[in-house]
Amino acid sequence: MVEFALLLPLLLLVLFGLIDMGRMFLVQSMVTNGAREGARMAALGYTDSEIAARANASMPGLDGVSSGTHTITSTAVCPAALTATSQRSVTVTVSGFHWVALGAISGLFPGGGITAPTPRATSSMRCMG
């Protein structure tokens, strides 16, 4: 019984660490999907506001993860009329989502604890006109 009491905090730390790692991979996957959807909209010639709206719509469930300040940037919108020789491409970057790794447990460490990486994704597509 004493051994279990000594190992329980370590086992819980490992368990919650694995759960948080899974959340990190989920968020990275959703951010990558948002960048891809935004690049697809940009390649079809939509405006910046429509690109951002589509990228946000393709990342459902990130409201609880985001600090509310994420950025969606695109290099340029494709022109409406493309010629056969114009090989333009657009790039959309989604970044700025933050969460605290291991939640309140990170406050137990001196110096602010564990910092989580910021998920960031960039996607490029050729203009389709």
Image (cartoon, grey):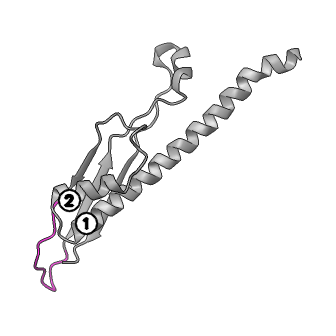
State the quadrant of the N terminus.
top right
Q: Please name whichever residue, 21 or 51, is drawn nearer the observer in this view of the structure.
A: 51
Give the vertical position of 35 relative to 89 (above or below). Answer: above
**Which contiguous range is marked in magenta?**
76-87
Question: For the residue labelled by badge 2, is the local secondary structure a helix, a strand or a loop?
Answer: helix
* Residue 98 spot, x, y in % from top left: 39, 35
**Quadrant assignment, res 75:** bottom left
**Quadrant assignment, res 15:** top right
Circle 2 crowding by C-alpha within 10 Å: few under 14, some 14–19, many from 20:
some
State the quadrant of the C terminus.
bottom left
Q: Please name whichever residue, 58 or 93, is drawn nearer the observer in this view of the structure.
A: 58
Residue at figure coordinates x 66%, y 27% from the top left: 13
- Direction right: furthest residue: 1
Q: Please name whichever residue, 87 or 120, is drawn nearer the observer in this view of the structure.
A: 120
Give the vertical position of 48 relative to 112 (above or below). Answer: below
Q: Is residue 101 left or right of residue 118?
A: right
Query: Is the stretch drawn in magenta largely helix, strand or loop?
Result: loop
What residue is disc 1 on? 41
Q: Are marks 2 and 1 in contact (CB under 8 Å)?
A: yes
The number of callouts visible is: 2
Residue at figure coordinates x 50%, y 21% from the top left: 113
What residue is disc 2 on? 50
Magenta run includes residue 82: yes
Magenta run includes residue 17: no
Q: Is residue 15 left or right of residue 39?
A: right
